[in-house]
Image: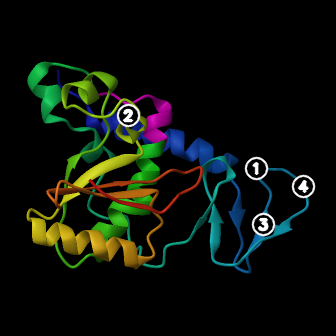
């Protein structure tokens, strides 16, 4: 089954745009500006340098980020397992939103700033694809919140793992998988735990 990734990306952009209109933002001095467009609610003051994202979750602004980055949402949807078996790997609207946040806050900041190239092994997984690859039943991949990335070597993946932890990138969970065979990383727009695991 052929996917029109241009259409998928266009849908994601429209969905994100709608939520951006309903999200809360900060001005340059760190003043909280009201949520819905046109609201006249009084402003709150919050710590400068922070921005408010989807569902008003406050996340640190990432100074490393420069430009949109090389990866697009279709890079997180493509699945060799799905293609080989004819399974659908189409995200729903909520997962599409999460994938965009994952790109903007984690994947592209890493790609833009880590000194070596990375590639995505796995991003979004439909429940069928997740079961086929042996993913956990509560995998963040099914929510569009996680990706498995690699530099192509264990040594490079160890460097990547340590670099991300010390970079200031606001991740939810980072996992060294099977002795740095790959690195699992996730982002939760409702709040990130900064969980570090070795499996």
Q: Residue at x 40, y 41 (%)?
A: 140
Q: Quadrant of residue 168?
A: bottom left
In the image, is residue 65 part of the stretch drawn in magenta? no
Residue position for label 2: 142
Q: Could you tell which of marks 2 and 3 lies nearer the N-terminus?
A: 3
Residue range of the region highlighted in magenta in the rendering: 89-97
Q: Is residue 86 left or right of residue 162?
A: left
Viewer-closest of 175 and 106: 175
125 up-or-down from 88: above or below = below
From the viewer's side, name the closer residue of 105 and 134: 134
Q: Which label belongs to residue 32?
A: 3
Q: Considering the numbered disc 4 on the image, is that residue within a helix, a strand or a loop?
A: loop
Distance from the alpha carbon under mark 4 to that under mark 3: 10 Å
Task: From the image, tell me which residue sits under label 4.
Answer: 41
First in sequence: mark 4 vs mark 2: 4
- Of tags 4 and 1, which is closer to the observer? 4
Distance from disc 4 to disc 2, alpha carbons, whole Å, reads 36 Å
The percent coordinates of residue 187 (x first, y second) are: 45, 53
Return the disc, 1 or 2, that comes first in the chain's sequence: 1
């Amino acid at each position: 089954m052929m996917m029109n990734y241009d259409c998928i990306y266009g849908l994601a952009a429209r969905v994100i745009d709608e939520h951006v209109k309903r999200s809360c933002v900060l001005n340059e001095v760190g003043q909280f500006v009201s949520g819905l467009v046109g609201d006249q609610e009084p402003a709150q003051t919050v710590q400068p340098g922070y921005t408010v994202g989807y569902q008003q979750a406050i996340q640190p602004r990432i100074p490393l980020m420069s430009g949109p980055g090389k990866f697009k949402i279709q890079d997180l949807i493509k699945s060799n397992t799905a293609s080989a078996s004819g399974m659908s790997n189409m995200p729903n609207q909520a997962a599409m939103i999460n994938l965009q946040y994952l790109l903007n806050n984690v994947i592209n900041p890493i790609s833009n700033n880590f000194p070596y190239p990375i590639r995505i092994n796995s991003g979004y997984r439909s429940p069928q694809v997740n079961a086929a690859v042996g993913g956990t039943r509560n995998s963040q991949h099914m929510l569009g919140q996680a990706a498995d990335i690699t530099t192509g070597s264990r040594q490079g993946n160890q460097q990547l793992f340590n670099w991300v932890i010390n970079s200031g990138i606001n991740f939810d969970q980072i996992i060294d998988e099977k002795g740095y065979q790959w690195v699992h990383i996730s982002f939760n727009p409702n709040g990130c735990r900064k969980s570090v695991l070795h499996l």
